[in-house]
Amino acid sequence: MQIKITGKNLDIGAAFQEHVESRLHEIAEKYFNGVTSAMVVMEKQRSQFQAEIVMHLTTGLVMQAKGHGSDAYGAFDQALERMEKRLRRYKRKLKSHVKKRRRQPLARHAAPSFLVAPEPEEMLAATPAEEESAEDFQPTVVAEAEEHIVEMTPGEAVMQLELQERPFFIFRNASHGGINVVYRRDDGHVAWLDPGPCH
């Protein structure tokens, strides 16, 4: 398993790097041996530390967890504990998924992703005349990247949502190829949006 550890506003020491690598290998061996890579980003925010762990499975699933603490070790351990809780909860489903996907990993489709600047303040308090000209307003793209939309079943998409700390997950429905979304509602339930196949 390839492990990449980076620090924002702090230096990553050899002892901490060793701690991270041994704990990640331990988790990977305990739950499955199909982890291709892991990335850990440590960030210092004033007196607090934030850790983000992202693990990629050979089948195409991605796991993600975040943690906070008063030191780097505490933040990382909290993130790892959260990830392990999810893994325990989904261990049976993950094993079934890995078995099913061993021969045929999830198909990934490249999709451009754009980071857009927020609307200017003057647009938010516009007069009616200004509102008409605001219809022609084009947002300013401040960054471009490439994301991947994975082709999977709705059940796999719900599991993927649960394995990551994000409010929604976009995927291509394996049964008809259309773009679908699963998202977490305010009441804690997961909703599934399926507009049907693309024409």
Image (cartoon, rainbow, N blue to C red):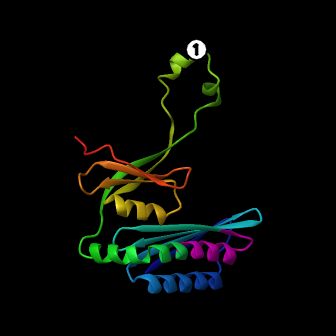
Place of residue 124 in the rendered image (x, y in percent of width and height, measured from the top left)? 62, 27
SS under mark 1: helix
Magenta stretch, residue numbers: 68-83
Residue, disc 1: 128
Q: How crowded is mark 1: few (under 14 residues within 10 Å), some or many (20 or more)?
A: few
- Of residues 72 and 57, the one drawn nearer to the viewer in this rendering: 57
Who's the residue at 73% across and 66% down the image?
48
The tally of labels here is 1
Residue found 60% across the figure and 72% down from its top: 79
Is residue 42 rendered to the left or right of residue 31?
right
Q: Where is residue 198 in the image (x, y as percent from the top left)?
A: 25, 43
Above or below, 61 relative to 118: below
For this view, does 168 lie left or right of residue 101? right
Q: Which residue is painted at 48% across and 30% down in the image?
A: 138
Residue found 52% across the figure and 57% down from its top: 166
Q: Which of 4 and 87 is in front in this view?
A: 87
Residue 171 within the magenta-colored segment of the rendering = no
What percent of the width, then of the height, locates residue 49?
Answer: 69, 68
